[in-house]
């Protein structure tokens, strides 16, 4: 499976690490080709990885801040046919650490789905996991739980395959409407880092 990652930051590194660990090909697309080439070079020898200016493949992961995600979708709209768009963003103001208003939508994922081309399914995933834990794929010896929400069953299954191949556990959360709850969970996970002094190295785990 070919995974295009739009973004060149820490979340891009985390998802790329899991994708390559699962035997998938990775393509980085950045705001400039040079940035994408730099991060691709970091993964030399870990699998099929390269930089490009256009998105392609089976999954396109939006590993950018939420405020940049709709623009990225519009920028690459003509290249998204036949792909699944994976939204890992959380609508949070990084400067104030406060939630952003997404009205009249219920979630940031629904904002992104609204600007996505017709026929391109959007799946919410990875937003409750931190970059460093994605690189490791686990916390305290336990594989990460990755919550997945989307309206297209086949698209959710493709994302679940990426998660499972990367050594993590996919957890189906239902339709894209559940992205509202997943984004609330992602925000809660962020705000408890200070009180718990976990330094963004914790994970949300479902135990049974």
Image (cartoon, rainbow, N blue to C red):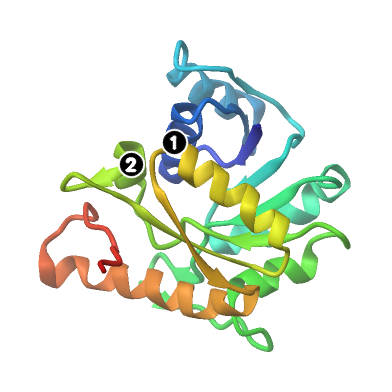
Residue 91 appears in view: yes
Disc 1 residue crowd, few under 14, some 14–19, many 20+, Cα 10 Å: many
- Residue sitting at x 67%, y 43%: 59
Disc 2 residue crowd, few under 14, some 14–19, many 20+, Cα 10 Å: many
> Which element type, helix, strand or loop, lies under badge 2?
loop
Q: Which residue is mark 2?
A: 137
The quadrant where residue 1 appears: top right
Q: Is residue 193 left or right of residue 56?
A: left
Q: Which residue is mark 1?
A: 18
Question: Are the residues tagged 1 and 2 within 8 Å (C-beta)?
Answer: yes
- Residue sitting at x 63%, y 61%: 123
The quadrant where residue 13 appears: top left
> Which element type, helix, strand or loop, lies under badge 1?
helix
Report x, y in % for residue 80: 81, 46
Report x, y in % for residue 54: 77, 33
Report x, y in % for residue 22: 48, 31
Q: Say which quadrant the C terminus sits in.
A: bottom left
- Residue sitting at x 72%, y 55%: 154
Mark found first going from the N terminus, 1 or 2? 1
- Residue sitting at x 45%, y 11%: 45
């Amino acid at each position: 499976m070919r995974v295009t990652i739009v973004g060149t930051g820490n979340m891009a590194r985390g998802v790329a690490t899991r994708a390559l660990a699962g035997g998938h090909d990775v393509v980085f697309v950045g705001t400039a080709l040079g940035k994408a080439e730099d991060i691709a070079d970091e993964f030399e020898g870990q699998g099929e990885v390269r930089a490009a200016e256009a998105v392609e493949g089976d999954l396109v992961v939006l590993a950018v801040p939420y405020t940049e995600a709709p623009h990225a979708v519009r920028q690459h709209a003509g290249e998204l046919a036949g792909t699944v768009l994976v939204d890992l963003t959380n609508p949070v103001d990084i400067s104030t650490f406060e939630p952003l208003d997404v009205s009249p939508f219920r979630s940031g994922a629904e904002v992104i789905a609204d600007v996505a081309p017709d026929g391109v399914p959007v799946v919410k995933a990875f937003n409750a996991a931190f970059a460093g834990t994605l690189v490791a794929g686990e916390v305290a010896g336990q594989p990460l739980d990755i919550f997945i929400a989307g309206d297209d069953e086949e698209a959710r299954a493709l994302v679940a395959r990426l998660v499972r191949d990367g050594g993590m556990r996919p957890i189906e959360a239902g339709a894209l409407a559940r992205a509202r709850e997943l984004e609330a969970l992602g925000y809660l996970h962020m705000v408890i880092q200070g009180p718990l002094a976990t330094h963004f190295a914790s994970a949300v785990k479902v135990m049974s």
